[in-house]
Image (cartoon, grey):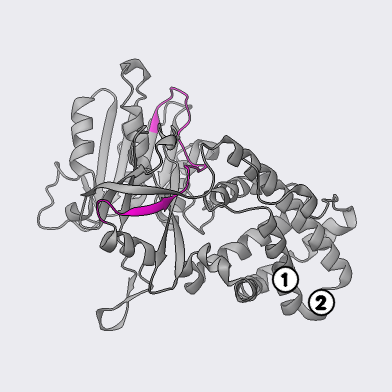
Amino acid sequence: MTLGCQATDLPKVVPLTDAQRKLVKATAPILAQHGETVTAHFYQKMLDHHPELQNVFNHTSQVTNKQPAALAAAVYAYAVHIDDLTPVLPVVEHIAHKHVTLDIQPSQYNIVGTHLLGAIQDILGDAFTPDLFDAWYAAYWQLANILINRERELYEGAKWAGWKSFKLEKRVKESEEVTSFYLVPEESSLLPLPEYKAGQYISVRKFVPKLGIHQCRQYSLSDTPNPEHFRISVKRELGAEGVNGQHDHPGSMSNLIHDTLQVGDTIDVAAPFGDFFIDSNPSPIVLISAGVGITPAMSMLNTIFSQKDAKSQRTTSWIHTAHNRSKHPFREHVRALAEKNPEKLRQLVFYSEPDVGSVKGQDYHLEGRADLGRVPKANLYLDDKASQYYVVGPVSFMADIHKGLVSLGVESDRVHMELYGTGSIPVAA
């Protein structure tokens, strides 16, 4: 693939001087105090000048301030670690994958750089001296160059770049909130579909009439790779309940997909990407999920047990938390897998609010929120120092599980967590 902007269209990347690194680091306390003000102003400024970018950014995350907050945290982390970027490289990798699934092009880094530096200057005023501006200009393009180069590699390794039209072949209701959508390409040249890694996602794009713009969302692929279709399992996001029973900031895309995407309809789809996926080593694997975090975990679980050679099927523990039976997708499927593979698969389910139809010992095993202290040690494979742990769910859930696993003696680098949307890697204190 040829990217939309050649290297000659971009500023030449010049290494930061020691003096510039010191200036960037010196601004970290200022960013800690004013970062969200800067990034909120940046988004407003950029989108005012380039309204077409509203078709790229998540409208809900803008309204709820999640996107400015996430960017502020990333910029602060970059300033703190400017001497050694190793701690922030996982976030950089995550951003690169998300960018390619949104078809971000190098030319857009010019737009972002101009308005980000302009926003810092607007908020800090005279404190943003010419020397400080030059330091941040060099720092920004250092990071941009890292991303552009990594994104070029990802684009070149993909079966296609940008958006392709897919048709809805089938929709299956998995629970009260979650429905699976089976998507097939309209172009036969895309078949067979790429064999993605279990845990990765696709982006989908659709015009949202009430917003008057396109919106893109990433949804985890929820099954083992299939050469003929992609399956995503989408939770209807009602938003937080506000006054008079109304919901604040409902998910515009999830509701649109649930309400309007019917069999035979089309939707734009990007190729699979994502930096969260299971490795290929044979060690035991523990999948720990909550809520709709079940979707990438389902892809992992189904991929493990799709291996025809039983010796290739990894010893697996499935630990999931749901509200209750009606909000527990894939319940029967996982139970059937566990019954079929009793020597290879253990499962443990928490229900935080069991409903009348929930049967303990059948639908779930423990009542309450996920608590590693209540999980039998055999389900965690703590004695095997090669065991790998994949955790996916709300940020607070992942942070708690990470902290709990570390307290049980699991090295942090064996705990892998999914970054959702505009979130960041939760770090246990």
Local secondary structure at mark 1: helix
The crowd level at tag 2 (other Cα within 10 Å; few <14, some 14-19, many 20+) is few
Q: Nearer the viewer, residue 13 or 275?
A: 13
The answer to whether 136 is drawn above or below residue 415 in the figure is below
The secondary structure making up most of the magenta span is loop
Q: Give the residue at mark 2.
A: 127
Specify the segment rendered in magenta: 262-285
> Does residue 371 appear in the picture of this structure?
no
Task: Give me the residue at 31% from left, 17% from top.
Answer: 310
Which image quarter: residue 75? bottom right
Which mark is first along the chain, 2 or 1? 1
Residue 277 at what x, y percent from top left? Answer: 46, 37
> Where 76 sits versus 429, above or below?
below
Q: Are the two marked residues, 1 and 2, in contact with CB atoms closer than 8 angstroms? A: yes
| Location of residue 317 in the rendering, given as x and y in whole percent from the top left corner | 33, 33
Determine if the magenta segment contains residue 308. no
For residue 30, which numbered disc appears in the image?
1
Element on which disc 2 rests:
helix
Task: State the separation of the CA atoms marked 1 and 2.
Answer: 10 Å
